[in-house]
Amino acid sequence: MKTLRVELGPRSYPIHIGTDLLGRADLAVPHLPGEQVMVVSNETVAPLYLDRALAAFQDLRADSLVLPDGEEYKNLEVLERIFDALLQGRHSRQTTLVALGGGVIGDLTGFAAATYQRGVAFIQIPTTLLAQVDSSVGGKTGVNHALGKNMVGAFHQPRCVIADTTTLSTLEDRQLRAGIAEVIKYGLIRDPEFFVWLEENMEQLINRQPQALAYAIQSSCASKARIVADDELEAGQRALLNLGHTFGHAIETGLGYGTWLHGEAVAAGMALAADLSARQGWLERPAVARVVSLLERAGLPVAAPATLEPQQMLELMAVDKKVVKGRIRLVLLKAIGEAIVTDAFDAELLQATLEECRSPEVLTRAGRQ
């Protein structure tokens, strides 16, 4: 096991990464403010890991709740089911919510923890690669709205993150590839050496080689922990973590939540961001080719779906948390490993990217023949 820390003063917390961590009371129980626990999972993960997770809390009053699985269920209606279970179980302000699952469960459970009785403790136990390298760390919680992804939420840091890499053995290939998109993001925004490592080791990641996966997870978490420690509330450099996300969120919203996985949409978004960066004269075209090649080797889409018209994409991108004074801000690339947040891009060049980087074959590339 390797332990990293997110340094946030009195709210600092550990990220434990390793094998066979589920059920280890010594990792979870010290972070509980009381003896009540509610473990929230979904219909896919619960049959595999809920009993093992509950074993860590066997000497406490531990309840569980199983929700439907999928991005389309990350909404206020499903959030209400968590509140119902907490109130029916008479959970107090000293309770702890435990998120056992991927990014959807983590976001839902974290938002419930942020708002139940004005805030209770929670623990992240991510079971997908995307959640282990990204969404479980940093305290972003929330739900989707019909008009925009993640537009309702709160910052609420977990007490600890327990990333048991053993759970990746049961992860579907499509989910694994979606998680790799977020791993690639870390190389692109600030770590060119890590990007080169990914170019050299992509096949090992796809084939779930344990040492490669462990290194990718640790490197990604270490990078995010540093960024969050410096900019917890996304007032500055933390926005770099949104590379590809403004494009990607527009794709997810436009197609309907759950049609594409989050990581698939982000992958296409990163390719679009690289293309626009080149049109701006900031990124060399050979660098764009490297980005696209690596995404394709991971089995990820590298263009927006042709079913979304450029004007529709623009309208959806305008409903984004990074919009300031009506201007869309994007994370773009000066080089591989050097990202910036800017609204100083040419609107006509953005239009050209949206018009030319579309593909009817993108669904097949994302693994949905």
Image: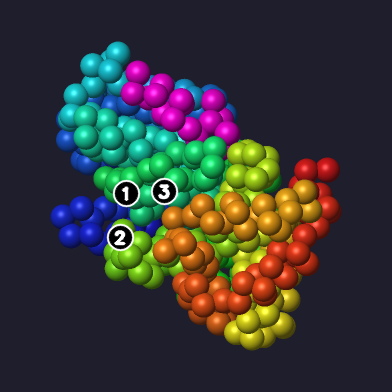
Question: Label 2 is placed on what type of residue?
Answer: Glu
Q: Earlier in the sequence, mark 1 or mark 2?
A: 1
**Image location (x, y in percent) of residue 358:** 77, 60
The residue that label 3 is drawn on is: 136
Residue occupying the point 49% across, 65% down: 327
Label 1 close to label 2 by CB (< 8 Å)? yes
**Image location (x, y in percent) of residue 16:** 36, 51
Q: Above or below — where is 73 with respect to 171?
A: above
Task: Work out whether residue 215 can be spotted.
Answer: no
User: Looking at this view, is 13 or 117 the one in front?
Assistant: 117
Label 3 close to label 1 by CB (< 8 Å)? no
The residue that label 1 is drawn on is: 155
Outermost residue, front side:
326
Residue occupying the point 38% across, 57% down: 2
Q: Helix, strand, or loop for circle 2? A: loop
Q: Earlier in the sequence, mark 3 or mark 2?
A: 3
The residue that label 2 is drawn on is: 232
User: Looking at this view, is 195 or 360 the one in front?
Assistant: 360
Left or right of 7 in this view: 283: right
In the image, which residues are magenta? 68-85
Select label 3 or label 2 by which is in front: 2
User: Looking at this view, is 175 or 111 the one in front?
Assistant: 111
Q: Helix, strand, or loop for circle 3? A: loop
Question: Label 3 is placed on what type of residue?
Answer: Ser
Q: CA distance from mark 1 to mark 2?
A: 8 Å
* Magenta span: chief secondary structure: helix
Select label 3 or label 1 by which is in front: 1
Q: Does residue 195 belong to the magenta stretch?
A: no
Q: Earlier in the sequence, mark 3 or mark 1?
A: 3
Residue occupying the point 52% across, 45% down: 148
